[in-house]
Image (spheres, rainbow, N blue to C red):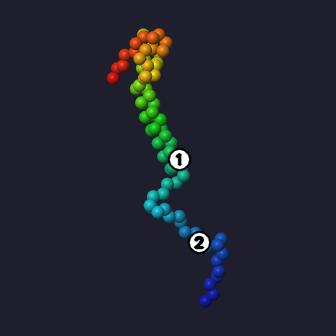
Amino acid sequence: MNQPTLSLEEQPKAPAQSRSGFFLYPWQKGVLLIVLLGVLYLRIWRRKQARILVCSHCGKKNPPHQSNCQKCSAPLMRVD
């Protein structure tokens, strides 16, 4: 019963197993990250666009906390 001895380099490698059984390749993780960042960006952009106040007199965009226009001092009407 002569069995050949195997060195560490010659031993067969077992495939990597994940604990949950769910495995993502690196490119899939990258695509998922890009999609999540895109959704986050769109949500922040839409929220910001909804709150910008535009002066009806001069057309300047003003932050939501202003009550008067920064350029012409006309009162800003909040439209909800």
Left or right: 50 in relation to 30:
left
Q: Which residue is mark 1?
A: 30
Q: Secondary structure at mark 1?
A: helix
Given the image, on which type of amino acid does mark 2 rest? Pro
Pinpoint residue 65: horizontal percent, then vertical percent.
Answer: 43, 22
Furthest residue toward bottom: 1
Pinpoint residue 66: horizontal percent, then vertical percent.
Answer: 43, 19
> What residue do we see at 48% from left, 46% from top?
32
User: Which quadrant of the figure contains the C terminus?
Assistant: top left
Pinpoint residue 33: horizontal percent, then vertical percent.
Answer: 50, 45
* Cα separation between marks 2 and 1: 30 Å
> What residue do we see at 36% from left, 19% from top?
78
* Residue in the foreground of this view, choosing between 50 and 14: 50
Among the 4 quarters of the image, the one containing residue 8:
bottom right
Q: In the rendered view, would you say 17 is above or below 48?
A: below
Q: In the rendered view, would you say 65 is above or below 41?
A: above
Q: In front of the other: label 2 or label 1?
A: 1
Q: In the rendered view, would you say 73 is above or below 18?
A: above
Q: Secondary structure at mark 2?
A: loop
How many numbered callouts? 2
Furthest residue toward left: 80
Q: Which residue is mark 2?
A: 12
The tag earlier along the polypeptide, 2 or 1, is 2
